Amino acid sequence: MIAATRPTQRPPDARLLVVDAGRHIDHVPRSAFVEYLRPGDLVVANDAATLPASLRGTHGATGAPVEVRLAGRPSLSPDVVNRFRAVVFGAGDFHTRTEDRPAPPPLAPGDRLVLGPLRATVERLLHHKRLVSLWFDGSADEIWAGLARHGRPIQYAHVQEPLALWDVWTRIAGPPVAFEPPSAGFALDWRALASMRARGVEFETITHAAGISSTGDEELDRLLPFDEPYRIPAATAEAAARAKARGGRVIAVGTTVVRALEHAASADGTVRAGEGVATQRLGPESRLRVVDAILSGTHEAGTSHYELLRAFLDDETLLRTTAELDERGYLTHEFGDSVLIEKAA
């Protein structure tokens, strides 16, 4: 597949590959997404707004340049922002492919990082020399102000022009908790939501701290997705129960929604409202208890997002789907085209 290189959330020529429960494949404009919904369905999207989670600065002991990409935190609370999980790179910026970025200077507990107006201490290494736990100095207000003034959206080399924060916020963005955009939601706009309502389709949200999609290191990428906190409102849990009771489907907009709903599901498929931390890795052995279909971006084999799609599709159909995406030149990554995949009946 070809990388989307322009930061346009809803290009008029965006495409959608649809795989229904019978494993029939359709190719349609992405704007036709709503036409594949049925009365009684429930669509659930992630309302997380994206943080300016890329911070450039220096390694205190050596003065060497570093880029810190925030990648997780233990809570969604706006008052709990001192501790972050982060991936640290050496000199350079997003114009260089992540895979080609140099490593930072050797990091050790106690190292100080100067990140614009922010100061952080390496608490410990987390299973890898570039994955660390950071403790930021200051109050919550000071840390939020520092992120707002100094941070930039995390960005990869396939988009060469610098991203603005509004490029990575969906139309339904709310709490600023995501580290990269829940980009499946780029397909949604107010017209689509109005069309859903007119068709008798419910719409609700969850909040999930979407993490980073790539670290540039194969060993570290195997740890993705990291554990991610989420919050499911009572209204969303109740809507899921109503949809199941009336024979409707639950359609997740993005992999983060699948992770949250399935993590919060009991054995009978009941979704628990409240906060949690999604720790599971979904794949071909997973039994989906809640989600019946997913609207997602196009994903390349070997990524954690692709593995999650294997919970919906058998490998033969997924390979056929990938072949059609390649043959027809679908665009991948966050500003690319989309797929709508329904799990087998």
Image: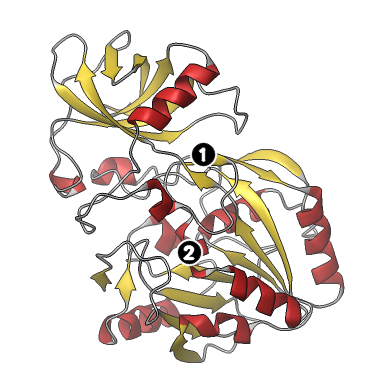
The colour scheme used to paint the residues is secondary structure
Q: Which mark is residue 186?
A: 2
Q: Are marks 2 and 1 in contact (CB under 8 Å)?
A: no
Say which quarter of the image contains residue 118. Answer: top left
Q: In this rendering, would 267 be left or right of 106?
A: right
Q: Secondary structure at mark 2?
A: helix
Query: Mark 1: few, some, or many residues within 10 Å (few <14, many ≥20)?
Result: some
The picture places residue 170, in percent across and down from the top left corner, at 51, 57
Say which quarter of the image contains residue 3. Answer: bottom left
Among numbered discs 2 and 1, the one appearing first in the sequence: 2
Query: Mark 2: few, some, or many residues within 10 Å (few <14, many ≥20)?
Result: many
Q: Nearer the viewer, residue 244 or 315?
A: 244
Which residue carries the number 1 mark?
Answer: 227
Residue lying at 44% horizontally and 74% vertically, measured from the top left: 338
Residue lying at 25% horizontally and 49% vertically, measured from the top left: 162
Residue 301, compared with residue 315, is above or below; it is above
The picture places residue 253, in percent across and down from the top left corner, at 57, 64
Residue lying at 55% horizontally and 29% vertically, measured from the top left: 74
The picture places residue 211, in percent across and down from the top left corner, at 45, 44
Question: Does the rendering let one see residue 314?
Answer: no
Q: Amino acid at mark 2?
A: Phe
**Alpha-carbon span between mark 2 and mark 1:** 23 Å
Q: Secondary structure at mark 1?
A: loop
Q: In which quadrant will I find the C terminus? A: bottom right
Q: In this rendering, would 151 be left or right of 267?
A: left
Residue 278, compared with residue 124, is above or below; it is below
Residue 1, compared with residue 93, is above or below; it is below
